[in-house]
Amino acid sequence: MSVLILGGDKIKPIKEMLGSFGVERIIHWTARNQKRGRKQDKPIPIDVNVVVMLTNFLNHNAMKHYRAEAKSKDIPIVYSTRNVECLKQEFISVLHKLDQDSEICKECEHYLSCYERDV
Protein backbone atom coordinates (compact mmCIF):
# COMPACT_ATOMS: atom_id res chain seq x y z
CA MET A 1 0.00 0.00 0.00
CA SER A 2 1.16 3.51 -0.80
CA VAL A 3 0.17 6.58 1.24
CA LEU A 4 0.56 10.29 0.48
CA ILE A 5 0.84 12.45 3.60
CA LEU A 6 0.03 16.14 3.13
CA GLY A 7 1.22 18.56 5.80
CA GLY A 8 3.42 18.30 8.85
CA ASP A 9 7.19 18.53 9.14
CA LYS A 10 8.40 15.73 11.37
CA ILE A 11 6.40 12.59 10.70
CA LYS A 12 8.71 9.78 11.86
CA PRO A 13 6.18 8.46 14.46
CA ILE A 14 3.46 8.56 11.80
CA LYS A 15 5.64 6.60 9.36
CA GLU A 16 6.27 3.97 12.03
CA MET A 17 2.56 3.65 12.80
CA LEU A 18 1.63 3.36 9.11
CA GLY A 19 4.39 0.78 8.65
CA SER A 20 2.71 -1.35 11.31
CA PHE A 21 -0.37 -1.42 9.05
CA GLY A 22 1.66 -2.73 6.14
CA VAL A 23 2.15 0.57 4.33
CA GLU A 24 5.19 -0.03 2.13
CA ARG A 25 5.59 3.38 0.52
CA ILE A 26 5.06 6.76 2.16
CA ILE A 27 5.25 10.00 0.18
CA HIS A 28 5.36 13.16 2.28
CA TRP A 29 4.64 16.68 1.06
CA THR A 30 4.96 19.30 3.77
CA ALA A 31 2.74 21.73 1.82
CA ARG A 32 4.54 24.52 3.63
CA ASN A 33 7.10 25.73 1.09
CA GLN A 34 5.36 27.53 -1.77
CA LYS A 35 8.61 27.75 -3.77
CA ARG A 36 8.32 24.09 -4.72
CA GLY A 37 5.55 24.89 -7.14
CA ARG A 38 1.86 25.47 -7.19
CA LYS A 39 -0.41 22.67 -6.06
CA GLN A 40 -1.84 22.35 -9.57
CA ASP A 41 1.66 21.48 -10.80
CA LYS A 42 1.96 18.64 -8.30
CA PRO A 43 -0.80 16.08 -8.86
CA ILE A 44 -1.35 13.09 -6.59
CA PRO A 45 0.86 10.25 -7.88
CA ILE A 46 -0.93 7.47 -9.75
CA ASP A 47 0.13 4.65 -7.40
CA VAL A 48 -1.16 6.29 -4.18
CA ASN A 49 -3.82 4.21 -2.39
CA VAL A 50 -4.68 6.56 0.51
CA VAL A 51 -4.24 10.30 1.09
CA VAL A 52 -3.62 11.48 4.67
CA MET A 53 -4.25 15.17 5.36
CA LEU A 54 -2.73 16.55 8.54
CA THR A 55 -5.31 19.24 9.02
CA ASN A 56 -3.46 21.52 11.40
CA PHE A 57 -0.66 21.95 8.84
CA LEU A 58 -2.65 22.57 5.64
CA ASN A 59 -4.43 25.67 4.48
CA HIS A 60 -8.02 25.47 3.28
CA ASN A 61 -7.20 25.98 -0.40
CA ALA A 62 -4.67 23.12 -0.43
CA MET A 63 -7.11 20.82 1.38
CA LYS A 64 -9.90 21.71 -1.02
CA HIS A 65 -7.71 21.13 -4.08
CA TYR A 66 -6.32 17.76 -2.98
CA ARG A 67 -9.67 16.56 -1.61
CA ALA A 68 -11.27 17.21 -5.00
CA GLU A 69 -8.42 15.48 -6.83
CA ALA A 70 -8.50 12.43 -4.50
CA LYS A 71 -12.26 12.11 -4.84
CA SER A 72 -12.05 12.34 -8.62
CA LYS A 73 -9.50 9.49 -8.55
CA ASP A 74 -11.60 7.54 -6.00
CA ILE A 75 -8.78 7.57 -3.41
CA PRO A 76 -9.78 7.31 0.26
CA ILE A 77 -8.87 10.35 2.39
CA VAL A 78 -7.91 10.35 6.07
CA TYR A 79 -8.28 13.66 7.92
CA SER A 80 -6.38 13.98 11.17
CA THR A 81 -4.18 16.14 13.34
CA ARG A 82 -0.52 15.13 13.70
CA ASN A 83 -1.37 13.17 16.85
CA VAL A 84 -0.40 9.55 16.14
CA GLU A 85 -3.28 8.00 18.11
CA CYS A 86 -5.82 10.26 16.42
CA LEU A 87 -4.40 9.39 13.01
CA LYS A 88 -4.40 5.68 13.85
CA GLN A 89 -8.10 5.76 14.76
CA GLU A 90 -9.03 7.72 11.63
CA PHE A 91 -6.89 5.45 9.41
CA ILE A 92 -8.59 2.34 10.81
CA SER A 93 -12.00 3.97 10.39
CA VAL A 94 -11.35 4.74 6.72
CA LEU A 95 -9.99 1.25 6.03
CA HIS A 96 -13.08 -0.35 7.63
CA LYS A 97 -15.32 1.58 5.22
CA LEU A 98 -13.59 0.08 2.17
CA ASP A 99 -15.31 -2.51 0.04
CA GLN A 100 -13.89 -6.01 0.33
CA ASP A 101 -13.12 -5.94 -3.39
CA SER A 102 -10.92 -2.84 -3.15
CA GLU A 103 -7.29 -3.22 -4.14
CA ILE A 104 -6.15 -1.95 -0.74
CA CYS A 105 -7.99 -4.76 1.02
CA LYS A 106 -6.81 -7.43 -1.39
CA GLU A 107 -3.16 -6.46 -0.79
CA CYS A 108 -3.48 -6.70 3.01
CA GLU A 109 -2.08 -9.74 4.81
CA HIS A 110 -5.23 -9.89 6.97
CA TYR A 111 -7.61 -9.93 3.98
CA LEU A 112 -8.75 -13.52 4.43
CA SER A 113 -9.47 -13.17 8.13
CA CYS A 114 -11.33 -9.88 7.69
CA TYR A 115 -13.78 -11.25 5.20
CA GLU A 116 -13.60 -14.92 6.16
CA ARG A 117 -13.00 -16.03 2.61
CA ASP A 118 -11.52 -19.28 1.42
CA VAL A 119 -9.00 -19.26 -1.38
Image (cartoon, rainbow, N blue to C red):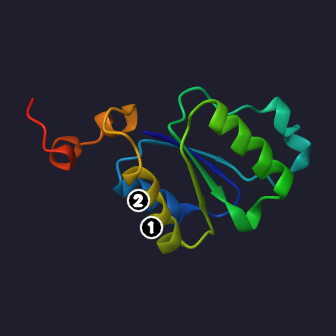
Helix, strand or loop under label 2 = helix
In this rendering, position of residue 33 left or right of residue 16: right
User: What residue sits 63% from the left and 69% below the top?
Assistant: 81
Q: Dot 1 surroundings within 10 Å: few (below 14), some, or many (20 or more)?
A: few
Q: Position of residue 89 (x, y in %)?
A: 45, 67
Amino acid at circle 2: Ile
Q: Quadrant of the N terminus?
A: top left
From this viewpoint, which residue is outermost toward the left?
118
Of 27 and 71, the residue lying toward us:
71
Q: Position of residue 52 (x, y in %)?
A: 59, 52
Q: Is residue 1 left or right of residue 5?
A: left
The residue pinned by badge 1 equals: 89
Tag 1 and tag 2, C-beta contact below 8 Å: yes
Nearer-the-camera pick, 84 or 66 = 66
Residue 8, above or below 38: below
Element type at mark 1: helix
Q: Position of residue 42 (x, y in %)?
A: 77, 33
- x%, y% of residue 98? 40, 44
- Which residue is under mark 2? 92
